[in-house]
Image (cartoon, rainbow, N blue to C red):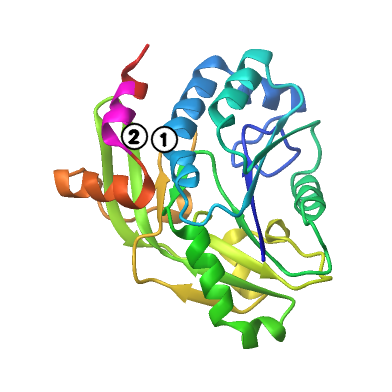
Amino acid sequence: MQVIGLCRFSYPAIGGFQVEHETIEERIAYLYDAERMEERFRLLETIALPCLREQTDQDFTLIVVTGDSLPRGDRDRLHDLTADMPQVQIRAEPPRRHREVMKEILNSARRDPDQPCLQFRHDDDDAVSVDFVERLRAAAGDCQGLLSKNRSVAFDFNRGYLAEAGAEGICAAEGVFPYVVPALGMHVRGGCPLTIMNFAHHKINRFMPTVTVTDAPMFVRTRNRFNDPRDMAGGPALEPLTPELAGAFEARFAIREARVKDVFGSG
C-alpha cells in the first residue's frame, strides 16, 4: 500500500497559519526572514529529517512543499539536505489557499487513485519514531474490517515527547497528546478523494473512526521561537535529557544530541 507524507517548509499559503498577516507579501517577508529560516533549517536537519532517513520501512514518499519565491540560497540548501533521500519530492508552489493546494498535491501523488493509500503530515520541526511507517502500515493491516466499511480511518500514535532543542542540547518531557500532527496517519479507501489535509488534525475524530495506539513514544514535537504548539500546552515541565534518554532519542528518533549542540551552537 502506498504511503505518502506531506511536509510544508515555509510555504506562504493563504490561510493556515497561527500568525496572521495583512498581505501575502508580509507573510513571505516573515517566512523568509534570515533568522527564522536559519532556525527552520537547523530543526529540519537535526530533528525532522534524520528519523525519516532511518525508517525501518523505506517504502514511502515525502512531499516537501515550499514557495516558488523561496530565496535561491535556501532552495539550494533544502535540496542539499534531502539529496540522499530518494523518497523526497520537493514542490515549489505559488501562494494559494492552504487546504486547497495541499489536498491537490496529495491526490496528485497517488500512483493509482483507485487503490487505497496511507497518508501522514510531517512538520519541519518534529520527529517520528524510526518505525513509524512500518507501524502505520501494520496497524492498517490489523484493521481491515474497519477500513473496508469506511472511506477513511485515522491512526493516532499519541504517546510522545514535547521538547526544545538548542546549543545547550535537548530538554524534553513524555506525555500522551491525542490528535497532534506527528505520528497521526490516515487510511484513504481506493476511489476516495479525501486527504489528511481535509481535516484539522485535532478534530479528525469528529469525521471518521480513529484507532489509538499508545504503547510506546512515537514522536517528538518541538517548541521553538517560531512555533507554539498550543495543543500540547499545560504538559509536564521539560527537563534536560539524561544519558539514558539521550540514547533512547537516538535509537527511537535518530535524534543525536551531540549533533543538535553542534548545529545550534554554530554561528
Name above or below for residue 12 compared with residue 237. above
- The residue pinned by badge 1 equals 224
When the figure is inspected, residue 60 is found, relative to residue 158, above or below; the finding is above
Dot 2 corresponds to which residue? 165
Label 2 residue SS: strand
Question: Is 163 situated above or below 57?
Answer: above
User: Is residue 93 covered in magenta?
Assistant: no
The answer to whether residue 26 is left or right of residue 125 is right
Identity of the amino acid at label 2? Ala
Give the quarter of the image for residue 143. Answer: bottom right
Residue closest to the far left: 243
Horizontal arrangement in the rendering, residue 152 relative to residue 214 (left or right): right
Pointer 2 with pointer 1, Cβ within 8 A? yes
Q: Which residues are magenta?
A: 256-262
What residue is rendered at 62% in x and 26% in y? Answer: 79
Point 69% across, 22% down: residue: 70
Which mark's residue is nearer the viewer, 2 or 1? Answer: 2
Q: From the top left corner, tell me how far across and down residue 231 is, in percent.
A: 47, 55
- The x, y position of residue 74, in whole percent, is 61, 19
Residue at 31%, 19% (x, y): give it. Answer: 265
Q: Is residue 224 left or right of residue 17?
A: left
- The kind of residue on which mark 1 rests is Asn
